[in-house]
Amino acid sequence: MHMAASPHKVGATGGAGSGSSSIVETLAEFARRRKSFWVVVSLAILFTAWEIAGRVPISFAFPTFLETLSALIEMALDGTLLPAYLITFQPLLLGVAVSAVLGIGLGIVMGLSDKAEWLLAPVFIVLQAAPMAALVPLVTFVYGIGLVAKTLAVIMLALPVIVLNSYKAVRHVNPSLVDMCRSFQGTRMQQIFKIIIPDATPVLFAGLRLGIAAGFIGVMLAELLITPTGIGDLITYHRSVANYAHMYAAVASIIAVSTLTLAALQYVELRFLRPEKRRK
Amino acid sequence: MATPMQARAADPAGTARSDAIVEVRDICKRYGDLEALRGINLDFERGKLTTLLGPSGCGKTTLLKIIAGLVPATSGQIRINGRVVTGPGPERAFVFQDFALMPWATVLRNVGFGLELKGVPQAERHRIARHYIGEVGLSGFEEKYPHELSGGMRQRVGIARAFSVNADVLLLDEPFSAVDEQNRRKFQEDLLRLVDKERKTFLFVTHSIEEAVYVSDRIVLLSPRPGRVSQIIEPAIDRTAAPDVIRRDKGYLDVVEEIWQGLRQYAE
């Protein structure tokens, strides 16, 4: 198919001989093959809509895309953004690490044992359903306004999602693979480590991604509700002085960081844990 | 017409044979109120291919899984080489209807997985796996992943895996049901070649009458609700003949017809 199509393409471009049509063709070819082209188009539409909405303007507090972008560049260059991230990342990384280890561990145990499920599942189902933002002030009463309280806020949001997804991941393992392992006299440990965990990996990682996204929500809640630090401080400060472009730049940057973190996690999963996905 | 069916009247339960490797004694299976199997007594002779055939709901797969030790029987006994067994064992290997291949592992690792679980060193299990990958006609596909193979090729991996552990009895649960018709025929021919070469005992579950008659030394017909042995047929077909000749052979066609007459009452 490909072999037949490419010479034809080359012939057509050579025949037309005009520069513009060749650019269009290259773009068309790119659009057909590359997912990234469509990602760029999607972002371009979003940013254009933002720019137009800012120029209308829909609110005096709503900056245009270009104003926000220049504020972001300014903050990155004048050294306010990086130190803010260093502060925000402390409770985030700590909380996500604890949630990941504890959450996947508990989830797997709940998936393997009915009794562990009966004991723990109700707690996490309630926690997942609860509006956690309402509990953040409670954490402040008990643990103050320091790193512990903010880390706890991250864990409160990330842990239930990771636990419940890990549990479902184990419960949805292909029963036929488990039977296969039994039929070849695999021990229970071999069954868990060679069949159940590898087969659960895709869903475990889906839970981890949701958990990290929830962790970002948690750290922002903590920095906005407990005490303004890091990125939360940037947002609060620029809002208070009506510096809306800078405020939006801080908000947009944390969204971008969160998105890139999740994309990186997906890459790591596909690259190192799913050998069968490496080639199509 | 008389030759294929000669053993049926003489020995209705198929028991009391001299060299039975698998003995099924009074097996019953209930799922709550549902009676899946009632009083099954069967002997499976060493080195033969026996097929469990019947309409859906007759419990043929359940019986095979009970023999495999994957499903517990409600009552009754399974003896392998004269010894009572209650779970899976090294003398039996199972081939799954849905292949049961690990999607994250290569063909080589999948085929060697039974040996991996037993702690066979890597070099040794790769050597054995490569041998059986060749035997099922998949040489060159060792480093492929299951999703890169067709349904027929995946089941060849499942069969190679079962051969690799060198079990005496191979239990095949509708191994070709997910394989298309042309590949199915080729597969049946290859299976007969392997049966001939490997000298093992095969227990084969299928719902295809033609398939059963084509590959089996002996066919156990089960009737549904609850599953019972209704008939045992020994199609005495000359397997040295070419596959196309066998499929047009009068004896072959007569047995197919005979079984259909027995089963048609269960068809809706």
Image (cartoon, rainbow, N blue to C red):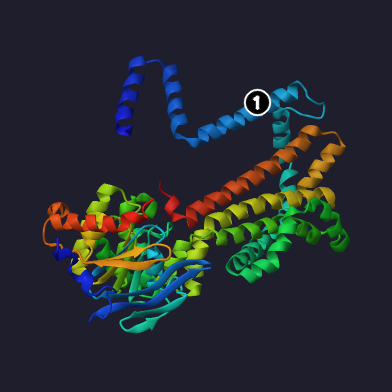
Task: Using the image as rendered, state which of residue B224 and residue A238 is in the foreground.
Answer: B224
The residue located at (11%, 62%) in the rendering is: B240
Q: Position of residue A177 (x, y in %)?
A: 45, 63
The disc numbered 1 marks a residue on which chain?
Answer: A
Q: Is residue A267 visible?
A: yes
Q: Is residue B236 visible?
A: no
In the rendered image, the quadrant that contains the N terminus of chain A is top left
The residue located at (47%, 71%) in the rendering is: A190
B213 horizontally vs A106: left or right: left
Q: Position of residue B146 (x, y in %)?
A: 38, 54
Residue reaching furthest right?
Answer: A141
Q: In this figure, which residue is indicated by the disc labeled 1?
A: A48
Q: Position of residue B55 (x, y in %)?
A: 36, 57
B171 horizontally vs A235: left or right: left
B247 horizontally vs B179: left or right: left
Instruction: Classify B266 as above or below B226.
Output: above
Task: Using the image as rendered, state which of residue A66 and residue A256 is in the foreground.
Answer: A256
Task: Using the image as rendered, state which of residue B14 and residue A80 is in the foreground.
Answer: B14
Helix, strand or loop at mark 1: helix
Amino acid bearing label 1: Thr
Instruction: Classify A55 as above or below B12.
Output: above
